[in-house]
Image (cartoon, rainbow, N blue to C red):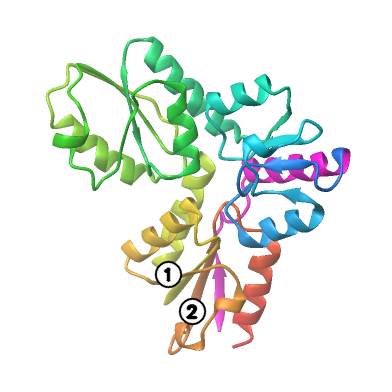
Amino acid sequence: MEVRLATARGFCFGVEAAIEQAEQAVREHGAGHVVALGPVIHNEQLVRKLQQAGLNQSGDLDSIEPDQVLLIRSHGAGPETLERARARGLRVVDATCVLVKRAQTVVRQLHEEGYHVVMIGNADHPEVRGVIGYAPGVTVIDHTTDLETALPYRERLGIVAQTTHSPAYVAEVIAKILQRPYRELKIVNTLCLEVTRRQEAAMALAREVDVMFVLGGLHSANTREMARLCTAAGCETHHIETWAQFEPRMAAGKKVAGVTAGASTPEWVIDEFVRNLQAI
């Protein structure tokens, strides 16, 4: 089978930095002494690798001992988490993605400037939960939200978005907001350019092949969004984590396959998948 790879795929700089910081912290402080409040990134293979190295990724802030180190994962955390950690005298290693940090700063600044902050994103995503902690009363909406009931009327709105969303998705939601009579909207682009590049490359490839394979964590927001965009481009698309989830029916009758990967997918997962797919 002919296999074509997306020109932009896999690890982004934020994920690479978070993994390096986690591994460095374990080396410095020892296995079992570094605790993250959840998976450092949304990729099961790397989560297991870090666990085997001695990183605890299922910690609770109240259960961290004074001799342990708190690792803030790539998705960031709200200010109350950091304040509680400082109050307990815990050492903190901050692996928050720099673009998530920027979104946190923007939300705080918008509130200080008198805007009612609106975040376009998934309210259950850890990045969103952390970012909205930087201003009181932030409204979280997505394209399925009923704006009439969910978005209270304020004359001045400050709008940001979850970093992993696509520009088209965010534009769709903003267009709905613009249909309502707000006196002023201030929109700050908090989207990740690396994620956007991967989305654009995936959609371009989806238009050239018979089937698309999007590799990455099933809980990864940026990977799920990439799979959605490939499907929307009119290509049969399969979102799977590794070659172990591949089924022959997925490639049956297909001549050319496209492969891309989310921003938290390691290169070895991509390489293994491509080798096996080429052998069909």
- Nearest to N terminus: mark 1 or mark 2: 1
Callout 1: SS: loop
Q: Separation of disc 1 and disc 2 at Cα?
A: 8 Å
Q: Which residues are magenta?
A: 1-28
Amino acid, disc 1: Glu
Callout 2: SS: strand
Q: Position of residue 183 (x, y in %)?
A: 17, 16
Judging by the rendered image, the residue that carries numbered circle 1 is 208
Would residue 41 appear left or right of 212 to someone viewing this image? right
* Up/down of 235 relative to 110, above or below: below
* Up/down of 93 relative to 240, above or below: above
Q: Position of residue 140 (x, y in %)?
A: 33, 35
Residue situated in front as seen by the camera: 219 or 222? 219
Residue pictured at 43% horizontal, 89% vertical = 253
Residue situated in front as seen by the camera: 171 or 71? 71
Query: In the picture, which quadrant includes the C terminus?
Result: bottom right
Query: In the picture, which quadrant includes the N terminus?
Result: bottom right
Would residue 212 appear left or right of 228 to someone viewing this image? right
- Rendered image: mark on residue 256: 2
Q: Position of residue 274 (x, y in %)?
A: 62, 74
Q: Is residue 16 magenta?
A: yes
Amino acid, disc 2: Val
Would residue 182 appear left or right of 100 to someone viewing this image? left
Residue situated in front as seen by the camera: 33 or 100? 33
Residue 36 image-quadrant placement: top right
Asked if the residues shown at circle 1 and circle 2 are in contact, with their CB atoms under 8 angstroms apart, the answer is yes
* Up/down of 15 relative to 181, above or below: below
Q: Is residue 237 magenta?
A: no
Residue pictured at 55% horizontal, 70% vertical = 4
Residue pictured at 63% horizontal, 36% vertical = 61
